[in-house]
Image (cartoon, helix red, strand yellow):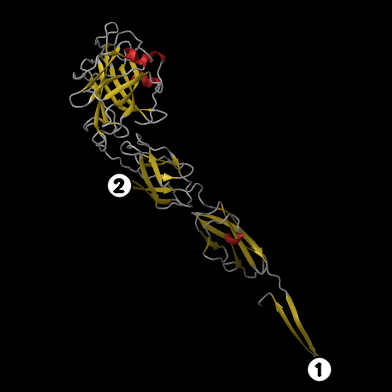
């Protein structure tokens, strides 16, 4: 679950617990309210936990901002090389372990929110993965629920993202883990070894946040139950250790247009109906970020940026805007994304922002027995547009079967969007309908061919007096 800010309601519901603290190189228990008041620190092995404070990024009800007097903190360097940080229920008076008990009184939820920084003190080591579990003293009664949320902060503006989510309640077989977080071995499941891979691969420092507590009876659950501790365990690896490589998984086929349509969702190269794209990796981007190369089989239809960088510690790129598809009809385009030696391709359909159509057609009688037909499209056509033509009376005014308007012709430009045809003389005014078919739609215009008026032009007249004959040379507009 990425880019998730908790609502106050969510804060009240997220509660936590953990497994028993290993007893090797364990620090003494320090009251959490002391650490918060001083923004203090605690160390174990090669890890320092510091800057404990109420997380200002996570919104919460006023009643949940404090109440740290019954929580203690201890750090442990474990025999397997991991380092654990435990939040332990304590008696505020003695400071000794004492599980938090859910009373039968409504109110005062046992929910705590805390953030802290983690730094590796050995320059030869890096943090690699994180895991957590419930303490053996956590007891669930009735339908109470113990939930623990572990968060990591992204780069500025430090939005906390849910990394691990544990939940246990009556009747469940055990902790329920969230889905979709990459495991440390790259399998992408919680069955993987070494816990869950930390964002950014192997780094020396992180900012984390924990939420822990119990849902109480006034939320509709029966009162009772307890929580003894929540322990977070971090593994370390030598600097330079490889991390599971991330890959790009492209989304399912879909449509891209400039106006409407359903967004394309899923991991990979995502395009929504407004031409907003993003890149999703199968894992967190490593140190330095992940640079993905993009190509389009038809840049005129869908133009993509040459590269997109997913910042270190993220697996989702910032949204980027593509130019509006410059197509006249639905056009299939193959988008390719390459990263870590692997190329994924997916076919999308680019739809025109405004479908190309005939806005109107006109026919005008010109001198010399001709007609000019002008075809107006509704916008500039991005590619040649071929219009099919027919005449209702081809014996008087025949038209070609088709007429092609060159690409990038402005509507109404008679130089490229018109054609001239001859018409035959007629004895009466004769209407002729010209039809233009484009995109499955027929548009018509009717022109009246004027009746032909016989005219005679005498070019020569010669009278032969001797014979009384008259010779006349003349022309006529009528063949008869």
Q: Residue furthest top?
A: 93
Disc 2 or 1, which lies upstream in sequence? 2
The residue at 34%/43% (across/down) is: 250
Q: CA distance from mark 2 to mark 1?
A: 107 Å
Instruction: Name the spot of residue 97 as percent of width and height, x first.
Output: 24, 11
Where is residue 149? Give x, y as percent: 31, 23
Q: Please report the residue visible at 30 percent of the width from the left and 30 percent of the height from the top.
A: 204
Which residue carries the number 1 mark? 466
* Apparent side of residue 428 relative to residue 336 in the rendered image (left or right): right
**Do the numbered discs 2 and 1 sit on residues whose CB atoms are within 8 Å?**
no
In the image, residue 324 above or below residue 367:
above
Q: Position of residue 425 (x, y in %)?
A: 65, 70
Residue furthest right in the image = 465
Picture disc at residue 342: 2
430 to 192, vertically: above or below: below
* Number of other residues with Cα within 10 Å of mark 1, as a class: few under 14, some 14 to 19, many 20 or more: few
| Quadrant of the drawing holding the N terminus | top left
- Identify the image quadrant of residue 171: top left
| Disc 2 secondary structure class | strand
Answer above or below: position of 307 versus 68. Answer: below
């Amino acid at each position: 679950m990425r880019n998730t800010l908790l609502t106050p309601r969510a804060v009240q519901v997220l509660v936590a617990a953990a497994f028993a603290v290993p007893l090797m190189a364990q620090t003494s228990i320090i009251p959490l309210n002391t650490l918060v008041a001083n923004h203090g620190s605690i160390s174990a092995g090669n890890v320092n936990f510091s800057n404990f404070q109420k997380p200002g990024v996570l919104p919460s009800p006023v009643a949940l901002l404090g109440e740290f007097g019954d929580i203690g903190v201890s750090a442990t360097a474990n025999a397997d090389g991991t380092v654990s940080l435990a939040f332990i229920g304590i008696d505020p008076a003695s400071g000794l372990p004492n599980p938090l008990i859910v009373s039968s009184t409504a109110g005062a939820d046992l929910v705590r929110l805390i953030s802290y920084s983690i730094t590796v003190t050995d320059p030869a080591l890096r943090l690699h993965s994180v895991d957590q579990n419930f303490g053996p003293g956590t007891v669930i009664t009735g339908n109470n629920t113990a939930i623990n949320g572990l968060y990591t902060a992204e780069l500025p503006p430090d939005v906390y993202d849910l990394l691990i989510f544990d939940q246990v309640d009556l009747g469940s077989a055990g902790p329920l883990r969230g889905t979709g977080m990459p495991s440390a071995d790259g399998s992408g499941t919680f069955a993987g070894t070494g816990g869950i891979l930390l964002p950014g691969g192997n780094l020396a420092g992180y900012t984390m946040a924990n939420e822990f507590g119990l849902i109480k009876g006034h939320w509709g659950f029966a009162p009772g139950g307890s929580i003894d501790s929540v322990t977070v365990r971090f593994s370390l690896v030598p600097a330079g250790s490889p991390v599971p490589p991330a890959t790009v998984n492209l989304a399912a086929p879909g449509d891209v247009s400039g106006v409407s349509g359903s967004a394309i969702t899923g991991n990979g190269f995502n395009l929504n109906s407004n031409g907003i794209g993003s890149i999703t990796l199968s894992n967190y981007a490593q140190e330095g970020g992940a640079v993905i190369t993009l190509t389009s089989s038809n840049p005129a239809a869908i133009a993509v940026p040459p590269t997109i960088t997913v910042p270190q510690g993220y697996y989702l790129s910032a949204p980027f805007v593509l130019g509006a598809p410059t197509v006249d009809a639905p056009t299939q385009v193959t988008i390719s994304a390459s990263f870590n030696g692997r190329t994924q391709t997916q076919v999308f359909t680019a739809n025109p922002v405004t479908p190309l159509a005939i806005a109107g057609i006109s026919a005008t009688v010109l001198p010399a027995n001709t007609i000019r037909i002008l075809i107006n499209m509704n916008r500039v056509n991005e590619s040649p547009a071929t219009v099919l033509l027919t005449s209702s009376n081809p014996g008087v005014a025949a038209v070609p079967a088709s007429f092609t308007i060159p690409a990038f012709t402005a509507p109404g430009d008679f130089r490229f969007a018109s054609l001239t045809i001859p018409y035959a003389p007629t004895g009466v005014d004769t209407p002729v309908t010209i039809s233009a078919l484009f995109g499955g739609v027929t548009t018509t215009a009717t022109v009246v061919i004027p009746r032909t008026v016989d005219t005679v032009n005498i070019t020569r007249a010669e009278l032969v007096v001797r014979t009384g004959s008259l010779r006349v040379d003349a022309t006529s507009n009528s063949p008869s």
